[in-house]
Amino acid sequence: MARLTPDATLQVRLEPGAVASDDAVWLPGRETGSLVRIEAKGNLVGTPIAVGAQPCASLVVAFDSVWVPLCGDQAMARLDPKAAKVTATSKVRIASADGRIATSAGSIWAITDRKGVLSRIDPDTNKPVAEIHVAAGAVAVVAGTDALWITSEDSGRLTRVNPHSNEVIEEIKVGAKPVRLAVGEGGVWTLNGDGTVTRVDPETNKVAATIAIGGETTKGDIAAGAGSVWVSLPGAPILRIDPRTDRAVQRFTGDGGGAILVAHGSLWVAAGPQTTWRLDPRMVAAVRP
């Protein structure tokens, strides 16, 4: 396995669910109840901003705000990034700390019940305005290809929802226990608990490939961008999947930490208990396996 050489090493840990805004990367501080902002240009790590108990799932940047699920408060906080303070907190319960929330069609979307409830949240009122029932064991939702994609861990399914009509379009059988997922590079990619990644073609809503990667994937993370699909596994190597061949073509040594993000032309990787690496994905892809 090859070794990675970071362009920058930051003294803060990238957590699953980190998100990019136009000029920064935002990290949830699960233990400290805060958000940390990293400037994209200078890699400056900002002062933690208190948001509430146990930020979880993922962050979303939309409607001039950063939206923060709070598992400890069973609520959703809305942060003004310019003022660096919470402007509203709504009683929206997030079903899974390992899930994802999304934005699409003028709304915020979150799984609010693992039985299979996808809630649509109006940013004008910060309250749910609709519920869509999806496959049982729902965990995470992401937006892409003008659709919402929801993983259901218990049933091993990926559900496609039309965010404009709130209609369930398709349920697709993927690998066992899918949790985190990514959209991009020509596919919808689910990271499954059976040591595989499933690629779904959004044009046909069919499984296009199943890629064996091994390792402890239930707490891993996946991202798509910069010409590749990237997987980070806790205490295990980082993997790069080539979407042209649907093969894991590179494995890199180091503690991936289970968090990875493609943003601002860089690959951001959790590299230790209090360390984040920022890497050039082109240089990573050029490393000989």
Image (cartoon, helix red, strand yellow):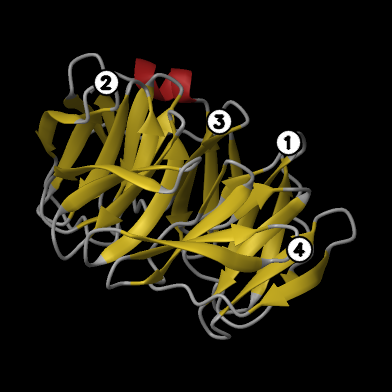
Return the disc, 1 or 2, that comes first in the chain's sequence: 1
Residue 195 horizontal side relative to residue 266, left or right: left
Looking at numbered disc 4 in the image, what kind of residue is underneath it?
A: Leu
Looking at numbered disc 2 in the image, what kind of residue is underneath it?
A: Pro
Query: Closer to the camera: disc 3 or disc 1?
Result: 1
Return the disc, 4 or 2, that comes first in the chain's sequence: 4
Mark identifier at residue 79: 4
| Whole-number angstrom distance, CA of label 4 to CA of label 2 | 36 Å
| Whole-number angstrom distance, CA of label 2 to CA of label 3 | 18 Å
According to the image, label 2 marks what residue? 243
Return the disc, 2 or 3, that comes first in the chain's sequence: 2
Looking at numbered disc 1 in the image, what kind of residue is underneath it?
A: Asp
According to the image, label 3 marks what residue? 266
**Residue 14 in view in this figure:** no
| Whole-number angstrom distance, CA of label 1 to CA of label 2 | 26 Å
Classify residue 144 by image quadrant. top left
Q: Nearer the viewer, residue 122 or 98?
A: 122
| Whole-number angstrom distance, CA of label 1 to CA of label 4 | 15 Å
Residue 160 vertical position relative to residue 73 in the rendered view, above or below:
above
